[in-house]
Image (cartoon, rainbow, N blue to C red):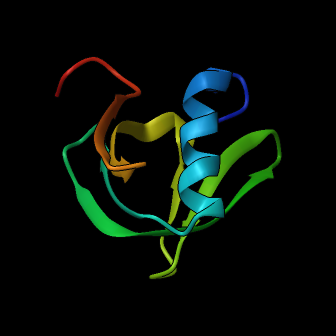
Amino acid sequence: MATMSRYQPISCDLYDWLEIAACWQLPVTLTVRNGRQWVDRIRTLEACEGVEYLLLHSGERLSLAELAILRLSWQGEDKLIRFAPSI
């Protein structure tokens, strides 16, 4: 888990994509920095002790600081949003 002293919030533009996916309950593919992937839907975004997380319908809780890639389809276009350098 990221500690508050090392935690860097993500940009508003990237956060907006997560909110779109959560609000519209879009199917997403999320990849974290270590390469692990989830295909799911985002239930909600939350903050705890200054660190932001997303909660998936499967029950997984992921730190936004660990996100590397978000894939989704929005308004008929496939989107690939990079949160971190290529893995």
Residue at 72 percent across and 41 percent down: it is: 51
Where is 6 relative to 65, above or below? above
Residue at 66 percent across and 61 percent down: it is: 23
Residue at 42 percent across and 48 percent down: it is: 75
Give residue 12's position: percent from left, percent from top.
68, 24
Give residue 52's position: percent from left, percent from top.
69, 44
Question: Can residue 1 be seen here?
Answer: no
Q: Quadrant of residue 17?
A: top right
Q: Quadrant of residue 67?
A: top left
User: Is residue 14 or residue 37 the one in the foreground?
Assistant: 14
Give residue 77's position: percent from left, percent from top.
30, 42
Question: Can residue 54 be seen here?
Answer: yes
Which residue is situated farthest in the right direction here?
49
Give residue 43's position: percent from left, percent from top.
60, 71
Residue at 79 percent across and 52 percent down: it is: 48
Which residue is situated farthest in the bottom direction here?
58
Where is 56 relative to 28, above or below? below
User: Is residue 7 or residue 30 the one in the foreground?
Assistant: 30
User: Is residue 75 or residue 60 the one in the foreground?
Assistant: 75
Where is 64 relative to 48, above or below? above
Q: Name the image quarter holding the C terminus.
A: top left
User: Is residue 32 or residue 40 the one in the foreground?
Assistant: 40
